[in-house]
Image (cartoon, helix red, strand yellow):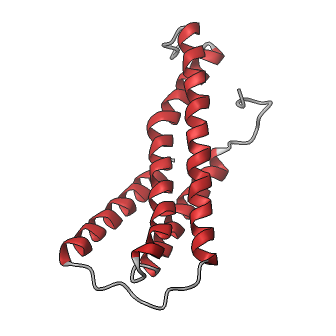
Amino acid sequence: MPYGKAWPVDTGLFFIPFSAAMLVAGFGALIAGWRTPWRYRWLLCLPSIGILLLLVLTVVAFWPMNAALYYHGTGSPKDTITDAQSIAMAQRWVTLDWVRVVGASAAFVAPLRALTAPWPQDTAPVDPPIVRVMLALVLAGVAAFIVWFVTNL
């Protein structure tokens, strides 16, 4: 496992700020392109929502599995799983990591498509108030998640 003296670099020092910056940039692009037609706007929604879901998956699934596998692998007194459970957990970790890779790839390709598509000349009609309220609530929730995510590092 990549921990201890043989692995002096904490990968979280790179991935956590980078992921938070990608989340902010994704929602910034979505906000900037909000008045575009839906045929274009969905390309901006995909990375924003995709990155958010991948970060939630990381916090909810990977962090607990990483801790459990680390405790088991080091023989820590905090170890609560058996060898068989650790093997199954490691297999689940690999499967979920492939889900992350595919999701991150889609979240990367969608904005590339948005950047290479001709800029739409038409604008979307003004969204109804309920859509604007929902958008504001979603953006507030994302901001709260970012604050929680960064403060719990």
Of all residues, the one furthest to the bottom in this rendering is 121
| Quarter that holds the N terminus | top right
Q: Is residue 22 visible?
A: yes
57 or 37, nearer to the observer: 37
| Above-or-below relation of 9 to 42 | above
Q: Residue at x 43, y 90 (%)?
A: 122
> In the image shown, does 128 or 92 lie closer to the viewer?
128
Q: Is residue 140 above or below residue 81?
A: below
Q: Is residue 76 visible?
A: no
Q: Residue furthest right?
A: 6
96 up-or-down from 36: above or below = above
Residue 134: x, y in percent?
A: 25, 67
At 59% from the left edge and 8% from the top edge, which residue is drawn? 83
Instruction: Pinpoint residue 28: horizontal percent, then vertical percent.
Output: 48, 74
* Residue 106 placement: quadrant: bottom right
In percent of width and height, residue 94 lies at: 62, 30
Q: How many marks?
A: 0
State the image quarter where residue 17 is shown: bottom right
Find residue 118 and report its horizontal and vertical position in percent.
58, 84
